[in-house]
Image: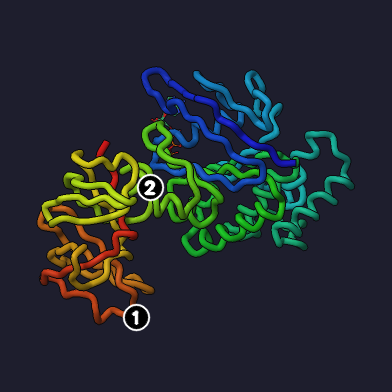
Amino acid sequence: MSHSVELAGIGMTFGATRAVRDVSLKVQAGEFFSILGPSGCGKTTILRMIAGFIEPTEGRVLIGERDMKGLGPNQRPTAMIFQSLALFPLMSVRDNIAFGLEARGVGRTARHAKADELLRLIALEGYGDRMPGELSGGQRQRVAIARALAVEPGVLLLDEPLSALDLKLRQHMRAELRALQKRTGVTFIYITHDQSEALAMSDRVAVMSAGLLQQVATPRELYENPATPFVARFVGETNAVAGRITAVDGGLARIETELGALTGRAGRRAVAGTPGTIYVRPEALIPGTGENALTARIERVDFEGSFALVHGRFADGGSLAASVPSTRLADAPAPGSDAAFAFAPAHAVVLGDE
Ligand code: ATP
């Protein structure tokens, strides 16, 4: 059975470091939930508080509506997978998966049946007799997950489990993990500093910065409607032009900048007469002039395969990033030239500065 996880105003202070400050959120049972943020923002600390390795200095952790205060890791319905997975090298894959069951007094036949069922689940049927050293990195990672799932946790906590894998394998494992989570229905709480990983896999994502929760939303909502300047810059690439908000009307905000007056959707704290910034995604910028356009001196064009990223410098010193699909590479402006890029107001958001 999967469980919900609720963090009610949790905080963690290590000496003078406030690693986590007043974080409240609720993960639904059966959800694939990611916590995303740069190194040191408090992600691992949150996971350790959920698992029961450390007690929060403030607030409460509830799993399946039950307050976990005072319960150690073995008394909680959670299992955790660490960054550097450690399979037992001298034990077969089957025995590795069944390890937690043995500790719980499950008999040999039942253990092996469970291990074989999990091997099917992770698409490694027939690999039970191999040793971990005879598996690829991605296969070992799947075995580590099977081992954690063997004890039927209501919540699986994953601490950057793909970070040691190469890019191709990581991308493949994203889809595998997502499918595995849906098949088992177990609540996954996944931490990562890789925004594309979080966007690709999660039902919802919590973005953290310096111990503080910035936003909890679906991947699309995060990308299209960032709630804070931090989220706008951290999730995906963005162009940011600062100015003064002059009008907010009908869901749109107009902002006066050094590059001219620009219009975007009115986001949080967009109030006329206050300082703000307009954020425009690279793919929203279309080469050409218009009434909502940005001009920049082009510095270089990076060909990335399916698209090219045009880099340049705005007159206010800010940097331009515009993506041009490879099929329209002929439209990309040449380095050294001044070029204009227009965008639709619906594809930009204006946020009040914090
Ligand atoms: P990373 O992605 O690098 O693992 P993170 O977001 O998981 O980072 P945490 O490991 O949660 O970050 O650490 C948050 C802050 O708390 C950091 O400033 C860290 O140095 C500090 N911290 C974590 N654990 C301890 C501890 N046991 N004692 C003192 N400070 C700690």
Looking at the image, the residue that sits furthest to the front is 250
Horizontal side of residue 24 vs 249, given as left or right: right
- In the foreground, 259 or 112: 259
Which residue is depicted at the point 27% across and 66% down? 285
On the question of residue 84 being in view, the answer is: no
Q: Residue at x 14, y 58 (%)?
A: 314
Mark 1: C-beta under 8 Å from nearest atom of ligand 1: no
Disc 1 crowd rating (10 Å Cα; few below 14, some 14-19, many 20+) is few
User: Residue 290 appears at what percent x and percent y?
Assistant: 19, 69
Query: What kind of residue is marked 1?
Result: Thr
In space, the residues marked 1 and 2 are separated at their CA atoms by 30 Å
Please state, as top left, top right, bottom left or bottom right, where the C terminus lies in the image.
top left
Q: Identify the residue at horizontal 43%, vertical 49% (top origin).
A: 222
What label does residue 327 carry, if any?
A: 1
Q: Is residue 61 visible?
A: yes
Image location (x, y in percent) of residue 162: 53, 52
**Residue at the spot x=65%, y=24% of the render?**
68
Q: Amino acid at mark 2?
A: Pro
Q: How many marks?
A: 2
**Ligand 1 positioned in quadrant:** top left
Q: Quadrant of the N terminus?
A: top right
Residue under pointer 2: 226
The local crowd at label 2, few if under 14, some if 14 to 19, many if 20 or more residues have their Cα within 10 Å, is many
Could you tell me residue 346's position as x and y percent?
34, 59
337 relative position to 262: left or right? left
Query: Camera-side residue: 38 or 236?
Result: 236
Say above or below: 286 vs 276: below
| 31, 106: nearer the viewer | 31
Q: Earlier in the sequence, mark 1 or mark 2?
A: 2
